[in-house]
Image (cartoon, rainbow, N blue to C red):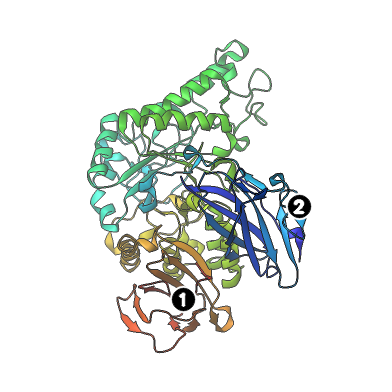
Amino acid sequence: MFKEAIYHRPKDNYAYACAEDELHIRIRTKKDDITEVTLMAGDPYEWEHDQWITTMVQMKKTGSDQLFDYWLASIKPPYRRLRYGFILSDGVESVCFTEKGFYPEPPLDDIAYYFCFPYLNGSDVFKAPKWVKNTVWYQIFPERFANGDQSNDPEGTLPWGSEGPTPENFFGGDLEGVIQNIDYLKTIGINGIYFTPIFKAHSNHKYDTIDYMEIDPQFGNEETLKQLVQTCHENGIKVMLDAVFNHSGFYFPQFQDVLANGENSPYKDWFHAREFPLKTEPAPNYDAFGFVPEMPKLNTENPEVKEYLLEVGRYWVREFDIDGWRLDVANEVSHAFWQEFRREVKAIKPDLYILGEIWHDSMPWLRGDQFDAVMNYPFTTNILNMFSKGTVGPTEFMENMTTVIHMYPRNVNQGAFNLIGSHDTPRILTECGGDINKVKQIFAILLTFYGTPCIYYGDEIGMDGGMDPGCRECMRWETDQQNRDLFEHVQKLIQLRKENEVLANGGDLQFLYGACEGDACFAYSRSNGEKTAIVIVNNSQDPTEYELPFELKRKTIKNLWTGEKFTAEAEKLVATVEGNGFAILEFEKAPIDENTP
């Protein structure tokens, strides 16, 4: 038994409340080392004849990555308190693992040996807004989606799509353009819009804010936004705005005052100046995002700055009834600020969605007191490594994605913001070298996976483009410039997700290790106990047979993608998947054996 690999902590993704009466307990062990894990648990105050009363719960293996196996037990402590340990067996040796270490037999003389979940408080249960789990987002870069009102075009606006995007050019996209194309968005099937910043700024991307309380005039005015939000809500579409609280723009009036007046400025403590006067060359002598002089970092621990930004958060929720905030560079702002931000905006709208931009392990922000989700870039990276770069095969893809899933509690995963491209990355078609079949496979995964998926504007019609600014081309509205086959493909997947709750967040997700020639396929199940859907993806160019890794209990199977129903003739199902294709199979009841969720 490889004890060095055994790991548990009584917090975060290893011990968490998934409901007000239920705990999930996880443990990690060396891959293929442990054959059986039992959770030994009891209330710390429940004793009989000087013996601690315990319950034994068989733990279920929920996945394996390259190095580890992960195990899960669900338990409902009758008094909401729990002390617990683990009995682990490798078929030869059996040990009890506690907070104090390993023992050949469970120590029963003192519960202080054991891990502790002191009390399941309802307020500690992580709860993202319920509506998010069933939302399919569409990211809009307002300057490039549609020009609905030419009267607010900035000076020098170019004819729509007349040349390629650059960091400086403008094409007149605005909020009225979005209002005029709500029917298009409804036709796709999306029910959430995520806007990149719309506040007054110098650039076309608006991440260099000048005034957080004013809509950029090139996008419209307050009445335009109110009309947009109302129109979206009437059509069942949520609206999420993007804000940059980590840094302002160069032309933010308070920063300009410090540039002009140095230490005599009343705003000198709004930023992180290392000396006065401020200098931008050869490098800024003040903290700036990525050393970019035009983006000075805000001092969010300054009471005036904090109150200013909190009012920004409150104002757009209170006055415009927006449904979410996406927070740029969220990891460089203090946890204390985000905790207060959450309290302030949720006091106005309790089911507001708070999304942080964080590219790495984000557990410290996902404990229920700050964000409802983060942008799931580990998901994106794994997709690109498989389909774009070809650096991993199907087995390693499943292992890597298992790591991603086990980074967070299950109820966090259900609200995770999954994306395959954005205004910061090359377009997915370009990443895939123009291979439309790969893009179709990626959309199939995105729209059948845990979490809330996001489509970057134009990806659904096959727009291409490299890294920023190449990925910010004007939306192509002429149908002869759109890949309508891809559009219908995405449209159908979204409809399937809506019609089959198990494909969204109505079921658990687990990767399957079936048999196929040459490690060509990977598969995962979505199961809620009543229904199971299995997604099989073929990474080779040739048709491949994939044998599901379990005996069938129900032989009537529906191919959700084609609508066909068929009856399996054998105890094992062998599915043929087209080259660079996929299959989505549904079983009326879970066909998997009791050891597989």
- Residue located beneath label 2 in the image: 101
Label 1 sits on what residue type? Answer: Asn
Instruction: Give me the disc on residue 168.
Output: none
Q: Is residue 393 visible?
A: no
Question: Is residue 119 toward the left or the right of residue 422 in the image?
Answer: right
Mark nearest the camera among 1 and 2 is 2
**Callout 1 crowding tier (Cα within 10 Å): few <14, some 14–19, many ≥20:** many
Q: Nearest the camera: 500 or 96?
A: 96
Label 2 sits on what residue type? Answer: Gly
**Residue most extreme to the front:** 49
Q: Position of residue 359 (x, y in %)?
A: 57, 48
- Residue located beneath label 1 in the image: 580
Kindly identify the residue that appears in the image at 56 percent across and 29 percent down.
336
**Callout 2 crowding tier (Cα within 10 Å): few <14, some 14–19, many ≥20:** few
Instruction: Report which quarter residue 483 is drawn in.
Output: bottom left
Circle 1 SS class: loop
Q: Quadrant of the N terminus?
A: bottom right
Which badge, 1 or 2, is on the more N-terminal residue? 2
Residue 200, compared with residue 161, is above or below; it is above
Instruction: Report which quarter residue 323 is drawn in.
Output: top left
Q: Nearest the camera: 6 or 148?
A: 6
Q: Is residue 510 visible?
A: yes
Kindly identify the residue that appears in the image at 44 percent across and 66 percent down.
526
Question: Is residue 202 toward the left or the right of residue 559 in the image?
Answer: right
Residue 195, compared with residue 321, is above or below; it is below
